[in-house]
Image (cartoon, grey):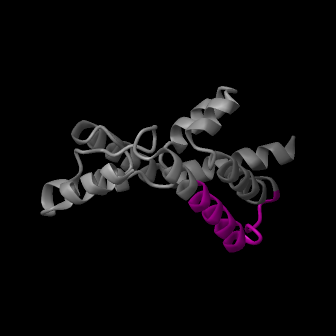
């Protein structure tokens, strides 16, 4: 019981410490969805999805027990989940620094980029979340950007 109380106290302390960050992300979410109907900065800036696009939906499907659906949205959810559990174990259960954080983060990043590249090749621009968003900042501000993207999409 004492160990569980320590874990809960560590989680509470982190939630309390990051309350302003949570608020900032929430405000960002509201503003970006109101203006662009999107959350991803890469998507808003370039119209192109990033390696993390779809992770929120995949997380929600995974939490609901819909593993196959989560993996179809973004298979990167598995290495991200394993990384989060690994970090959570050291931070909350053991109460220590995360061992091998840089290596673990490098592996997760490499996995995500490999999955992203493969799925962009297979699905872009026809399958969510690997779609092109025409209402993006680059298309508005960079002359010729729309034509360049249109040429890429036409060549697929």
Q: Quadrant of residue 146?
A: bottom left
Residues 40 and 147: in front is: 147
Q: Main structural element of the magenta stretch: helix, strand or loop?
A: helix
> Which residue is at 60% across, 36% downward?
72
> Which residue is at 58% across, 43% downward?
74
In this view, which residue lies farthest toward the front? 155
Q: Is residue 96 left or right of residue 19?
A: right
Which residues make up the magenta segment? 94-115
Q: Is residue 33 left or right of residue 87?
A: left
User: Can you say whether 155 is above or below 102 in the image?
Assistant: above
User: Can you say whether 8 is above or below 152 in the image?
Assistant: above
Q: Quadrant of residue 141?
A: bottom left
Whether the magenta-drawn stretch holds residue 81 is answered as no
Residues 150 and 30: in front is: 150
Report x, y in % for residue 110.
Answer: 63, 65
Report x, y in % for residue 79.
Answer: 69, 53
Whether the magenta-drawn stretch holds residue 114 is answered as yes
> Which residue is at 69% across, 32% downward?
67
Report x, y in % for residue 145.
Answer: 20, 60
Q: Quadrant of the N terminus?
A: top right
Q: Quadrant of residue 109?
A: bottom right
Q: Is residue 45 left or right of residue 1?
A: left
Report x, y in % for residue 81.
Answer: 68, 48
> Which residue is at 42% across, 39% downward?
126
Figure disc tally: 0
């Amino acid at each position: 019981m004492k160990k569980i109380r320590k874990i809960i106290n560590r989680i509470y302390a982190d939630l309390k410490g990051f309350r302003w960050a949570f608020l900032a992300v929430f405000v960002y979410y509201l503003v970006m969805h109101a203006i662009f109907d999107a959350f991803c900065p890469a998507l808003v800036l370039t119209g192109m999805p990033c390696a993390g696009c779809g992770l929120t939906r995949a997380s929600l499907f995974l939490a609901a027990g819909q593993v196959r659906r989560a993996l179809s949205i973004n298979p990167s959810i598995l290495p991200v989940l394993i990384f989060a559990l690994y970090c959570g174990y050291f931070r909350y259960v053991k109460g220590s620094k995360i061992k091998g954080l840089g290596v673990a983060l490098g592996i997760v990043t490499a996995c995500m980029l490999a999955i992203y590249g493969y799925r962009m090749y297979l699905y872009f621009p026809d399958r969510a979340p690997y779609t092109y968003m025409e209402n993006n900042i680059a298309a508005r501000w960079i002359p010729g950007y729309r034509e360049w993207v249109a040429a890429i999409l036409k060549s697929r």
